[in-house]
Image (cartoon, grey):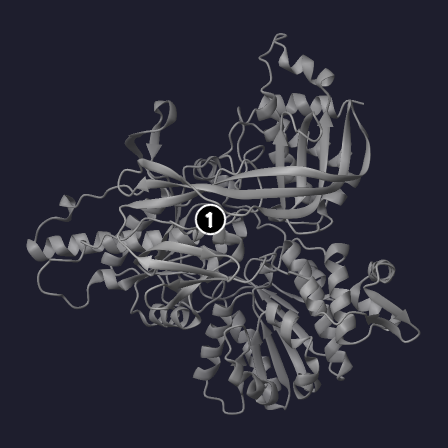
Amino acid sequence: MIIATGTASGKSLAYLLPAVSEVFSGGTVLYLTPTKALAADQLTSLRRLRLTQVRAATFDGDTPAEERQWIRQNANYILTNPDMLHRSVLPRHQSWTSFWRRLRLVIVDECHGYRGVFGSHVAQILRRLRRVAARYGARPVFLLASATASDPGVAGRRLTGLEMAEVTTDASPRGSTTFALWEPPLTDLRGEGGAPVRRTATAEAADLLADLVIEDVRTLAFVRSRRAAETVALAARRHLEEIEDLEYAHPGAPDGGVDEASDPDTDTDADTGREGPSDPAMAAVPADPSAAAGQGAERPGRLADKVAAYRAGYLADDRRVLEKALRSGELTGLATTNALELGVDVSGLDAVLIAGWPGTRASVWQQAGRAGRAGQDALAVLIARDDPLDTYIVHHPEALFGQPVEATVLDPDNQYVLAPHLCAAAAEIPLTEDDLDIFGPAAAGVLDDLVSRGMLRRRPAGWFWTSRDRAADLADIRGSGGSPVQVVEASTGRLLGTVDESSAHTAVHAGAVYLHQGETFVVDLLDLDSGVALVTAGQPDYSTFARDVTDIRVLESERSRPFGPGELHFGKVEVTRQVVSFLKRRTQSGEVLGEEPLDLPPRTLCTRAVWWTLPDTALTPLAENSGSRPVDLGGAAHAAEHASIGLLPLFATCDRWDIGGVSTELHPDTGLLTVFVYDGHDGGAGIAERGYARASEWLAATREAISVCECERGCPSCIQSPKCGNGNEPLDKAGAIRLLDVLLRP
């Protein structure tokens, strides 16, 4: 069964009642959530019930080793996540014998979060779970919950492999939500070409957060990156300190005398020259140590102390303290990444600020739904970044309101996802013919391939894992790369937090300014081999921004065919990204103080891509002025790349965020104008291959989508991308149509 009703509609109660009932009858319950925060929150709710028969415990990466054995032997209500299920619980299922035998209910909360390649991995993990449970004689009921699922029955069936009954009627009482679309004002600053610069979304969010805290309005401010969470919290605290200091020095003075300087934009993607999965940076505006110093006697209960940041990378204990403070009202304002987007119980919130379009309508409504719980009225504000996509949304509200949320797209039959999970399943319990129905129609062919590659051995009793290595390590379900880098204060050895390995090059390179809960540090050393970044507390008057270069190289064209006057290819490529330097920008003005080189190794992604080329002879008419302006070939190829990425999910079951692209007027490996669309996962994920198979339909639909769009020069509905590393420049809409006309010519 899947329950798909709005936020705060009672879904937690709907699965908690049958779960507790199963425990009281001697069964066990497995609760699965995408985030540790939600599991910890649910555990708190369970413990409030004071039911001695319910022995509930979280089992995740934060669980101390000394507690794990007790949990395996005694807990009857386990709260975990797909990562722990994949790497620990299923491979060591023999240690959970008692739990499996009594398993009655599997709860999959916030199931809309399992989309794209990640969702496809989770779908196979759930199939492995069903198989292990059956090994111990259990046939648990699966109960899914989501506030923003589109076509929930279909989504639930793809995720679990089981038929799903839908519950979609929402009769819960709800207050009204006032939803504002907010465009920051233009400043007196001038950018390239003398164009006025718009105030940043992060600066605007910080001021709005401070204003709401002053009015005692409990608020979450969602931002797009970890560094932005720190920056918004810090700027809001600084603003509140300035106001309070002014009031303290001059009681009754009007607030209008406070000077609100614009912070430089700290939530901008690096200029990578490609569209694709990007790494969040955390270098940000440093604290102003003078803000609270020398202001006379210390005043208890300052408003600035009611604002904090929340993000991944904090230590578990720090996250729990922040969550508790938000629930209790000790914190009034919290700047957060999407780590708090899901159903953590933050009842009592009055407002939500969303700094920058979060990527999907589903995320917008999920974040907005954090406010107005328990029937309260609420405020939600979407603050536009100075970005074409955000600008389009605030000027075209019909693109947001009255539109359905995006479908939950996943493909459990993707052979690149299925293969490592079949290996993991065989390592858990040797596979038999009877197991093939669980893993779907593609399993038999994939098993034959795994046998031919020597990864599995076929015997009369079934398929067996042949290696002493851990089969679960074959599947990186989140595509996060290696182990996190620990951020350590050099003088004390204090562990401040962690940074994803994929983000370390941009976030904690030597010389980077690093923020942690309002404290400012400068990175002394990044030791990639040891996975440690050493930092020293400092008070720099600048922020840092990593710069990188990205390249794509053709390794092998596995298939090719003529395509119009050009050629279409599918094969192996290597995408290389290297951080080569970082900029220092003055805190207040954004002035570039200098650029310092970095010597960091390149990061490479070996994956698969579909690409098309056009010869110079086919392009010559486009470059000539024959009654219409010449085509900017680079801008036309770039626009066609963006639009084709946006349309590929219609023809290959994927999420837009699973793929990336590169376009160039002259690629060194082909010697021709080339447009690449590649899988954003190591080894490939089958998406580009499907694009190759359906290229005619796909690219014809791309051309149609661009041409029928009513905009003049391009908009997010056709050629602009929310994740373009070049800031959607250059783009040539008319040129893209003409370029695709040439490519699609019979």
Is residue 2 visible in the rendered image? The answer is yes
**Which residue is identified by label 1?**
506
Q: Residue at x 52, y 47 (%)?
A: 359
Is residue 264 visible in the rendered image? The answer is no
- Above or below 611: residue 403: below
**Label total for image:** 1
Quarter holding residue 77: bottom right
Q: Is residue 731 left or right of residue 677?
A: left
Q: Residue at x 54, y 70 (%)?
A: 11
Nearer the observer, 692 or 456: 456
SS of the residue at dot 1?
A: helix
What's the amino acid at mark 1?
Thr
Pinpoint residue 477: horizontal percent, then vertical percent.
64, 61
Quadrant holding the C terminus: top right
Pinpoint residue 590: horizontal percent, then vertical percent.
31, 38
Residues packed near mark 1 inside 10 Å, few (<14), some (14 to 19) or many (20 plus):
many
Pinpoint residue 208: horizontal percent, then vertical percent.
30, 50
Nearer the observer, 103 or 687: 687
Quadrant holding the N terminus: bottom right
Pinpoint residue 250: horizontal percent, then vertical percent.
6, 53
Quarter holding residue 648: top right
Outermost residue, right side: 460
Q: Residue at x 47, y 69 (%)?
A: 37
Quarter holding residue 170: bottom right
Nearer the observer, 378 or 82: 82
Q: Is residue 113 left or right of residue 613?
A: left
Q: Residue at x 72, y 31 (%)?
A: 612
- Above or below 422: residue 99: below
